[in-house]
Amino acid sequence: MKGKALEKVPRGKLLRVEVNFDKKITWLRITGDFFAHPEDSIEKIEDMIVGLPVDFNQNKFALCLDDFIKRKDYELIGLDASAIIRVLKKAMENPI
């Protein structure tokens, strides 16, 4: 299945998530008008999420993703890990 969602993140920017999934997330694209440094950090975050089972715990994985971002010293401006996971869940709840 495919899903798509977008959200204006509180105190932030527009976040768009497109996802392909079955029992696991098989493809993911995170875009929007936010900033990320280094530039490839969003691709690395996408790679980290691909393969995740669709029934993951949203709060637990947001903490895990936040830890990953901090360990890699990525800088996200206009969004955070919980926003990415929240919009990802929305995309999977509304398949297209």
Image (cartoon, rainbow, N blue to C red):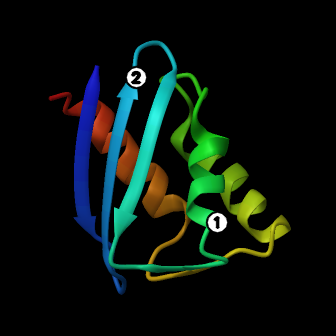
Whole-percent x and y of residue 50?
Answer: 58, 34
In the depicted structure, whether residue 71 falls above or below residue 28: below
Whole-percent x and y of residue 94?
Answer: 19, 33
Query: Outermost residue toward the front?
Result: 40
In the depicted structure, whether residue 42 falls above or below residue 51: below
Determine which quarter of the picture holds residue 89.
top left
Query: Outermost residue toward the left?
Result: 96
In the image, 72 versus 80, the foreground residue is 72
In the image, 75 versus 63, the foreground residue is 75
Q: Is residue 60 left or right of residue 19?
A: right
Q: Is residue 33 left or right of residue 48?
A: left
From the image, which quarter does the N terminus lie in?
Answer: top left
Query: Outermost residue toward the right?
Result: 71
| Residue at image location 46% in from the left, 33% down from the top | 27
**Foreground mark, 1 or 2?**
1
Q: Residues within 10 Å of mark 1 (few under 14, many from 20)?
A: some
In the depicted structure, whether residue 56 falls above or below residue 29: above
Whole-percent x and y of residue 63?
Answer: 68, 55
Task: Determine which of the numbered discs, if any, sits on residue 21 in the image.
Answer: 2
Task: Determine which of the numbered discs, if any, sits on residue 11 in the image.
Answer: none
Determine which quarter of the picture holds residue 30.
bottom left
Query: Outermost residue toward the top?
Result: 23
Tell me the kind of residue under disc 1. Answer: Ser
Residue for badge 1: 41
Q: CA distance from mark 1 to mark 2?
A: 22 Å
Whole-percent x and y of residue 76?
Answer: 57, 78
| Residue at image location 49% in from the left, 25% down from the top | 26
Secondary structure beneath label 2: strand
| Residue at image location 47% in from the left, 13% down from the top | 23
